[in-house]
Image: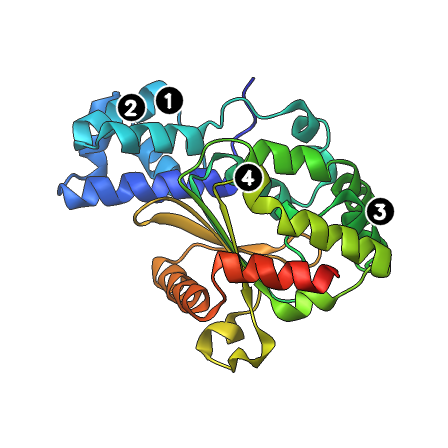
Amino acid sequence: MTAIPPRIGRRIVGAALRRYRQDLGYSLDDAARILDCDRSKISRIETGQRGIRNRELHHLLAEYGAGEQARETLAKVANPPGIRDWWRANAHNLPEAYADMIVLEMTAPHIMVYETQQIPDLLQSAEYAHALADACADLIPASLRQWITSECLNRQETVLAEPRPEITVVIGEAALWHMPGGPTVTRAQLTALASVDSRFPEVRVQVLRSENGAHAARAAGSFTILRYMPSLEVVYLRGIPGGTFVEDQREIEGYASAFRQLTASALTPDASATLIKQMQR
């Protein structure tokens, strides 16, 4: 089963194709000859105005000299395979950017999350997600609140249970004290968070202590980096109603640098787990 490719995915693939073409010194006409099409089609593909079939994508990338891993990665972004029924049934109710982010999240080999004020979506218990959605009732549409709470665990299992090289999550200490739903819900959430490493060994959780001090990375606020391969990544900024994407490579490099600072400043995963267990009690 194949989903409609997300709009941001088309732009990511188009930008990668444009870089490959320009690095070789090829013109739009040269690329058009490869696919036996007109140059306007290549232009629309490279600007993300239209998608590209995997057959055409592989043909172009082979001519550009891209490696097998790059071809497979870009094919997944261009035409995401096996998107789950739970997403397809609800995608029309979700804000465009949020729906696109979820599809990209399912296919990104590397996911880096920094969350300042709440437990990240991928690590929330169903009760915590429900309480958080209720607390934001005035800001989040009812359809989105219902989806967040009903499909919370499906989304986690889809993303976290599949083999990936790396998922790193940095959580500000203030988020651990945030108690939507009260102490009982928070304690259960902390219990679930403390056991993440045993349930999902590829997930690395670090806590950034409040007394760590201010630095430039903190000013970035909450963000998620979805990385497919070097120079092929996008940053998602959560917001109301659906968030937004950062696609400019220089800006993305700034977020990547900030995340490296955050991981260096935060507690190690073992020390973070110990702190969370202490807070549990």
Q: Local crowd at mark 2 within 10 Å, few (<14), some, or many (≥20)? A: some
Q: Secondary structure at mark 4?
A: loop
- The earlier-in-sequence mark between 3 and 1 is 1
> In which quadrant of the rendered image does the N terminus lie?
top right
Q: Quickly name the residue at label 3.
A: 142
Query: Residue 54, labelled with which disc?
Result: 1
Image depth: mark 3 or mark 1 in front: 3
Q: Are marks 2 and 1 in contact (CB under 8 Å)?
A: yes
**Between marks 2 and 3, how big is the CA–CA gap?**
42 Å
Amino acid type of the residue that numbered disc 4 sits on in the rendered structure = Phe
- The earlier-in-sequence mark between 2 and 3 is 2
Q: Quickly name the residue at label 2.
A: 58
What residue is shown at x 38% (from left), y 28% (from top)? Answer: 75
Q: Secondary structure at mark 3?
A: helix
Q: Local crowd at mark 1 within 10 Å, few (<14), some, or many (≥20)? A: some
Amino acid type of the residue that numbered disc 2 sits on in the rendered structure = His
Amino acid type of the residue that numbered disc 3 sits on in the rendered structure = Ala
**Between marks 3 and 1, how big is the CA–CA gap?**
37 Å
Q: Local crowd at mark 3 within 10 Å, few (<14), some, or many (≥20)? A: some
Image depth: mark 4 or mark 1 in front: 4
**Between marks 4 and 1, how big is the CA–CA gap?**
31 Å
Q: Are marks 2 and 3 in contact (CB under 8 Å)?
A: no
Query: Residue 200, labelled with which disc?
Result: 4
